Image: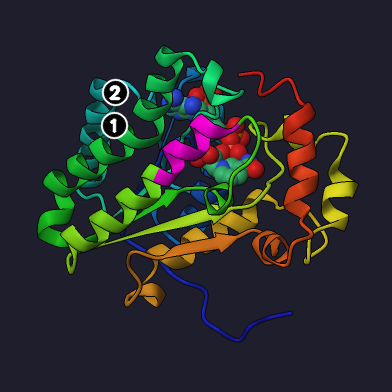
Amino acid sequence: MTSGAAEPRLDGRAALVTGGTRGIGLAVAHRLGAAGAAVGITGRDPEGVRQAVGELEKAGVRAFGCAGDVADPAHLAACVRQLTEECGRLDILVNNAATNQPYGPLMEADPDRWTTAFATNVEAPLRLVQLAWRAWMREHGGAVVNICTEGTHGVGPNVGAYGTSKAALLHLTRQLAGELAPRVRVNAVSPGLVRTEMARFVWEGAEQRIADGLPLGRIGEPEDIADAVLWLVSDGARWVTGADLLVDGGTRVRAAAGSSAGYAVHEQLRAADGPTA
Ligand SMILES: NC(=O)c1ccc[n+]([C@@H]2O[C@H](COP(=O)([O-])OP(=O)(O)OC[C@H]3O[C@@H](n4cnc5c(N)ncnc54)[C@H](OP(=O)(O)O)[C@@H]3O)[C@@H](O)[C@H]2O)c1
């Protein structure tokens, strides 16, 4: 089915996507690249970065890689420097890299790992927005999307540290939207359960049960999220800032009605050993 609406175009623009080597980040990099943007991607594993850049280039995308941990401020500065030197601009920032550790009840949370979760999921996005603002966006404008989670709209077992950091990221999104308008639009996309490595411990072996409880009848694919990001950074969303776009197959609607696909997810979260990475 075609919508009849023109596909968003980003020709001549440059984008940075953190955690762009697989999953949602890689799908976002493909979508932005296919729309005409040059795309820089990050990830901790240098080989993963190299392979993803190769895959993007094969698809005709002008792609750059910057390997490192987003919790390292020097790495973030190097990424922004590299992209602005290569492209002469930085119009789009997608803060996608995140950790879902520490996993477990908050009363047992290791304070060091809690700190790492906030450094990765909250501080890094803020540092990158500051860097992008100073390097390009303050003068020329831009668009930022922070990848949050549908989970912040409720609470779930064992994901308290992750959810709390993502709730902070959502508030940061709104705060920045207020502070950076009208030059820069800052929005959030909040995915439901998506078929990626990060969430494998939730969906593997339970996919049909979870899908049966979802209004739209399936778990998400990375491209479902990438399409929302593409729209938010495009001119089609020119009057949208501070928004939290839920892309969750209706999970929240069902949860609000009291019988939730979320509950199937919660059963998994309660039973799972937790993420492996
Ligand atoms: N999948 C879901 O169900 C779901 C639901 C709600 C929200 N989200 C959010 O969606 C985003 C993407 O998750 P995903 O599911 O696509 O995960 P994924 O498939 O595991 O991909 C994560 C990406 O981030 C990179 N990464 C992880 N930690 C990093 C760090 N500290 N520094 C730099 N790069 C890092 C990974 O590469 P390296 O391992 O090489 O670093 C990889 O490129 C996250 O913000 C997540 O919270 C996901």
Residue drawn at 74 percent across, 31 percent down: 270
Write down the quadrant of residue 258 in the picture.
bottom right
Pointer 1: what residue?
79
Q: Residues within 10 Å of mark 2 (few under 14, many from 20)?
A: some
Residue 50 visible at all: no
Q: The disc labelled 2 sits on which kind of residue? A: His
Q: Is mark 2 within 8 Å of ligand 1?
A: yes
Question: Magenta stretch containing residue 233, yes or no?
Answer: no
Q: Is residue 33 left or right of residue 154?
A: left
Residue drawn at 17 percent across, 65 percent down: 183
Is residue 40 placed above or below 4 in the rendered structure? above
Residue 67 position within the rendered picture, expressed as x and y whole percent measured from the top left = 40, 23
Write down the quadrant of residue 54 in the picture.
top right
Residue 233 position within the rendered picture, expressed as x and y whole percent measured from the top left = 39, 63
Is residue 92 placed above or below 101 in the rendered structure? below
Residue 3 position within the rendered picture, expressed as x and y whole percent measured from the top left = 63, 83
Residue 2 position within the rendered picture, expressed as x and y whole percent measured from the top left = 68, 81
Q: Is residue 242 left or right of residue 184?
A: right
Residue drawn at 43 percent across, 69 percent down: 9
Write down the quadrant of residue 243 in the picture.
bottom left
Pointer 2: what residue?
75
Magenta extent: 159-167
